[in-house]
Amino acid sequence: MSLIGFENCIKNIDMYTFTCRSCWFVPIATGWAIRSVDNGTGCVVDDAYTLGGNGFYFSRTSGAVEGVTITNSEILATGGKGLRFDGCLKLLIANTVVGECNDTALLLDGTTGYPVADVNIVNSWFGTKASASAGTVGVDLRGNIADDDVHRM
């Protein structure tokens, strides 16, 4: 499936599990390839490619997002941010490249009132553009973060 030129290529509002395999996303400069607004529990993104705009943003209004898996993907978020989670329980990112970001490549935000816990990052790469603003970081962990396991990041 290819989704090109949308503000949010996939927008999930209050849907629990969705699976996205072998997808190609090209959001507009300020948009997100995947924007999961309220829930996203149990979502799987496998073999995704995104170029432009922002990568994936998961948040939830009534608790932390749970059980998200992102594998075998390439997220070239030339418009800004790579991956963002406003609270997250049980996250797996494996064999994934998040790069060319003008802003943070991975933000795990535990300051949103929801914790970040049980995060596993395996064989993945996070980076920003050489022209990114001073102070921009590859991985930003904020607030209440617990039980993280990072291997060969």
Image: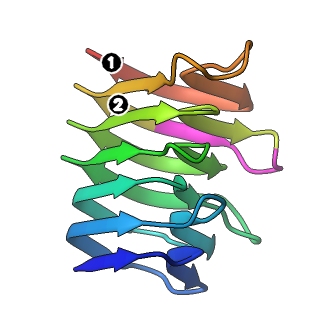
Amino acid at pointer 1: Met
Which structural element holds mark 2?
Answer: strand
Amino acid at pointer 2: Ile
Find disc 2 in the rendering and name its residue.
121
Q: Counting other residues with Cα less than 10 Å from the Cα at mark 2, is it few (<14), some (14-19), or many (20 or more)?
A: many
Name the spot of residue 134 as percent of width and height, x first. Answer: 73, 13
Bounds of the magenta segment: 112-118
**How many circles with numbers are drawn on the protein?**
2
Name the spot of residue 101 as percent of width and height, x first. Answer: 53, 34
Residue at 52 percent of width and 78 percent of height: 6
Residue at 24 percent of width and 69 percent of height: 23
Residue at 39 percent of width and 79 percent of height: 17
- Is 120 included in the stretch rendered in magenta? no
- Is 114 included in the stretch rendered in magenta? yes
From the image, which quarter does the C terminus lie in?
A: top left
Quadrant hosting residue 28: bottom right
Which structural element holds mark 1?
Answer: loop
| Mark 1 touches mark 2? (CB < 8 Å) | yes
Name the spot of residue 135 as percent of width and height, x first. Answer: 74, 14
**Sequence-first tag of 1 and 2:** 2
Q: Is residue 64 above or below residue 5?
A: above
